[in-house]
């Protein structure tokens, strides 16, 4: 069985009504597309309580990373204010906060005892989008853990009725290889997982290109700008707007 499951619901409707995946835009540009973000599984390390904050670093060492998101309403093709964006990812050692981490070796067997970080909240945060649908997070470059390509988890919840968007965003291997030359990553080396997650993307999606973050060097760190398209019903919950009605 593939690691990802097929995601149903409105993601499956995307091709039928002309909605695909969100494409990244520059920080000052208006979105040219308003496609549904590629759906993905939440993963085993989600938690119920996430701090409302923009800076999620806490005491974690690592290369600075800024993630700038713009949430788009795929029905209106307009920025969506008041949406809740939640992110979480591993630290430089490949560990998540708030959970019992099971580290695996290359033969897919537990490598030592579980590492318990329950009660901690590093590298987790939530933001409410502003009037332009934007939310920004200050964090560090994620570390890797076997057997996954380097990634971050994102969940977007619309401000009212609507489809919650759950996805994972990936960091290109060539950028990871450079980032992992510096401490606190260097002692672990490059990520041994060289797989292309877009080849295993959900079949209900029309395009897997939005799985990848477009990372640019900024000072001693990196910055990425990414659009997140979500389905929002507003007052018309359960019914499509007139634009999408069939005569």
Image: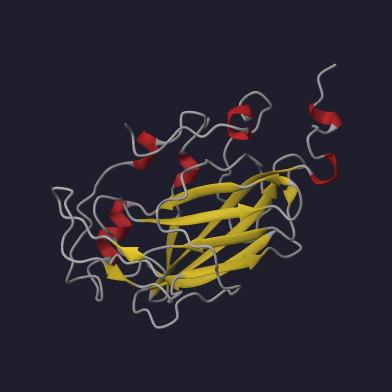
Q: Is residue 142 visible?
A: no
Quadrant in the picture for the N terminus: top left
- Judged left or right of residue 181, residue 36 is right
Q: Is residue 205 visible?
A: yes
Quadrant in the picture for the C terminus: top right
Q: Judge whether 223 appears above or below 159 on screen.
A: below
Residue ID at (46%, 45%)? 41
Q: Judge whether 49 appears above or below 133 on screen.
A: below
| Number of numbered callouts drawn | 0
Q: Where is residue 113 drawn, in percent x and y?
A: 20, 66
Task: Choose between 211 and 160: the one closer to the eye.
Answer: 160
Q: Where is residue 8 drawn, in percent x and y?
A: 55, 31
Residue ID at (75%, 59%)? 81
Farthest-out residue, left: 107
Task: Choose between 99 and 217: the one closer to the eye.
Answer: 99
Quarter of the figure with residue 104: bottom left
Q: Where is residue 135 drawn, in percent x and y?
A: 62, 64
Colour option used: secondary structure
Farthest-out residue, bottom: 59
Residue ID at (24%, 70%)? 185
Q: Judge whether 230 appears above or below 10 on screen.
A: below
């Amino acid at each position: 069985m593939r690691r990802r499951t097929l995601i149903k619901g409105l993601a499956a409707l995307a091709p039928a009504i002309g909605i695909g995946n969100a494409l990244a835009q520059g920080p000052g540009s208006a979105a040219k597309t308003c496609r549904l973000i590629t759906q993905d599984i939440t993963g085993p390390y989600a938690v119920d309580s996430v701090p409302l904050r923009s800076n999620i670093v806490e005491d974690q060492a690592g290369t600075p990373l800024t993630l700038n998101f713009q949430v788009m309403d795929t029905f209106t093709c307009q920025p969506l204010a008041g949406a809740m964006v939640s992110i979480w990812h591993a630290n430089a050692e490949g560990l998540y906060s708030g959970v019992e981490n099971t580290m695996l070796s290359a033969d897919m067997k537990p490598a030592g005892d579980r590492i318990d970080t329950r009660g901690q909240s590093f590298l987790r945060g939530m933001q409410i989008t502003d009037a332009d649908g934007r939310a920004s997070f200050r964090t560090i470059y994620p570390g890797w853990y076997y057997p996954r390509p380097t990634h971050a988890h994102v969940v977007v919840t619309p401000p009212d009725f609507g489809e919650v968007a759950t996805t994972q965003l990936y960091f290109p291997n060539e950028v990871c290889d450079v980032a992992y030359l510096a401490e606190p990553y260097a002692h672990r080396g490059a990520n041994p997982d060289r797989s292309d997650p877009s080849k295993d993307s959900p079949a209900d999606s029309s395009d897997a290109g939005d799985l990848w973050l477009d990372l640019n060097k900024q000072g001693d760190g990196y910055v990425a700008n990414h659009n997140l398209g979500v389905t929002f019903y507003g007052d018309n919950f359960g019914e499509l707007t007139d634009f999408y009605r069939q005569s």
